Amino acid sequence: MQDPVTVDDRTVDRELLDFVMRTPRWFFGSTFALAVGLLAGVLVFLTMLNWGLQFLGYSSPVYWGFLIVNFVFWIGISHAGVMISAILRIVQAEWRRPVTRAAEIVTVFSLMTALMFPLIHSGRPWRTLYWAFPYDWIRGMWPNPRSPLVWDPSAIMTYLTSTILFVYIAMLPDLAIARDRATGPVRKTIYGILSLGFRGTSRQWRIQAVAGILLSALILPIFVSVHSIVSWDFAVTLVPGWHSTTFAPYFVIGAVHSGVSAVVMAMIIIRKIFHLQNYITADHIDSLTRLLIAVAATWFFFLMLDFFFGLYGTEPTEVDTWSRRILEGEWRYLAVIFALCSFIIPVPMWLFRGVRRSFFWMFVTTVLVNIGMWIERFMLIVPALERKSPLTFAYGDYTPSISEFILVLASFCMVTLGVLVFSKFLPLMPVADIKEGKIMKQEMKIGRADVPATIRE
Amino acid sequence: MGIRDNTELLGLYEGPDQAADAVGNLKEAGFEDNAIEVLSATPYPEGAFGEQTIKHRLFTFPFAGAACGLAIGLAWVIGAQVSLPIVTGGKPIVAFPAIIQILYEGTMLGAVLFTIIGVLFESRLPDGIGLYDERIADGYIGISVMTETERMQEARTVLNGAGAIDIISAEKSSPAAAPATSNA
């Protein structure tokens, strides 16, 4: 946690801005491959617009399939980024410095991707305007604010707007550094405009510090509200398996579980491809994994709570849903994969220091968690709909179509492409913050030991 | 004499100690606290250069924003429900338990937006009038002093005395990073 950055300021600038100022060849290949993946999703989407939702294979009673699973999954991923950043800023944890920016950027792009899915799922995305905005009041068309279809956009747009502004304000000093380091006139002008003439006066730094804490304190309740509201999309219905009072905290903690894992995974990838070994150390991954252990344990508690209280009432439809989720058909295999990936394999492994400090094992286990958590959302949503009615003629099966798989793939491409393109224009690590860490860090002597001490205002 | 007729000098220093000396010497020479600014590419602890304590009212902005957000949220949800009444099983048209989510989001969005406005206002951004030098990004610390043109030579002497490696000046306000006259 206290691994110091030992290089000088110029080297910090050079190393962190290297990818911004110089474009390696692999960037073009990767961007192209990701763009092709994204384009495939766009083509599926356009075909769906022409043919309607049945093109994706949806029919009664299961209308919420991969699209809504993906929506919940990406909303979940988007949560941890800002949560980590905000909590670490508020408690002024020194080890936050290399972590915050990448976490926030993962949040921004995964949230944008998440937002796509309800729009695609609506079948006619432009009609969602009716739900959310009172744009056609002349004809007496008003949205119904009592509907979760309005709660969702209001929560997500609030979160997205707040996150983008939060990231932008935190990025002003780095935009100023990029302005000073940029060589071409176009880049210099763009960075100059975006940095708003930030000069690094004492007042500007002071306000930056206060704003970081203040905005963090404001964003944390928004982050909790967003996934709570997403959970209420399910919980306010009478569908067995969804109608649960614990859904909001269960969803929030599940989001944090998958999200923090995604951040760890992203940090390991970023460290490798951008050569940031001087900044992201085993200490950072170790610290995040300790947090993950606590989060995973809490998530498991809520999972069990949902399970036991689902069965405790012995309501036949509820019991049937749980039975279908974990004991019947192909679902039982998915249930085993889900349990192994999201908890049974990774969490015991994280208890070992050697695993926590191993980039390879942490990458593997965090990928497993995200596979498990994607399956969790799938198991949560679809089996409940397959048996939504006690009337047997309303039973239905769901088999995902190739088109849905392509849309899932496209969503991963979209997030990765977004982060990659962002990193081409701005550093994924807060340069000024890293430098501040060097200034703030001093050593003090206690007895015969040199102990890291941090100077704070 | 208006601020436009003043001269701004910017001295560049290699380290924080010399920069702190420069600030101290300028104060001793009678230059006012609010005429002296410290520029750095890295945030130093407040008061590291002996500069005046920064006073701000950033904490008031989110409260104002939250109040506005709540008011707009209330107007929107009540207006929408009254304009298109949807009768649902004898429940009230304006049902607060079902709209409290939107009121909450409106309140928080207002608080965040006003905080952002507050950050820009309190940071004096956009800032296009102050002197700046790109060497500050290399780790040099800039000490800027705004003074009447008659005292410019005195200020230059003080800045040099603290070990400035370069001093740049602008006869009147100029954009950040704009060309300026330079002499050591």
Image (tube, coloured by chain):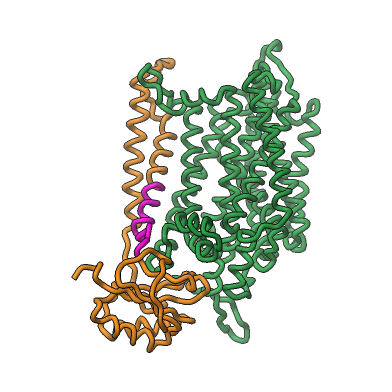
For the point 49% across and 33% down, the residue is: A153
Q: Position of residue A289 (x, y in %)?
A: 67, 57
Along the line of sight, the residue nearer the viewer: A60 or A208: A208
In magenta segment, residue B174: no
Q: Colour of chain A?
A: green
Range of magenta residues: B112-129
The answer to whether any part of residue A279 appears in the image is: yes
In this rendering, position of residue B60 left or right of residue B101: left
Q: Colour of chain B?
A: orange
Q: Position of residue B84 (x, y in %)?
A: 37, 18
Relative to A120, does residue B145 appear above or below in the rendering? below
Relative to A84, does residue A317 appear above or below in the rendering? above
Q: Position of residue A403 (x, y in %)?
A: 72, 27
Residue farthest to the left, as pictured: B1
Relative to A260, does residue A328 appear above or below in the rendering? above
Q: Quadrant of the C terminus of chain A?
A: bottom left
Residue A384 sits in which quadrant?
top right
For the point 64% across and 22% down, the residue is: A63
Relative to B62, does residue B141 appear above or below in the rendering? below
For the point 53% across and 62% down, the residue is: A178
Residue A97 sits in which quadrant?
bottom right
Give the dominant element type of the magenta stretch: helix, strand or loop. Answer: helix
Label total for image: 0
Along the line of sight, the residue nearer the viewer: A442 or A332: A442
Along the line of sight, the residue nearer the viewer: A287 or A164: A164
The answer to whether any part of residue A314 appears in the image is: no
Residue A361 sits in which quadrant?
bottom right
In magenta segment, residue B124: yes
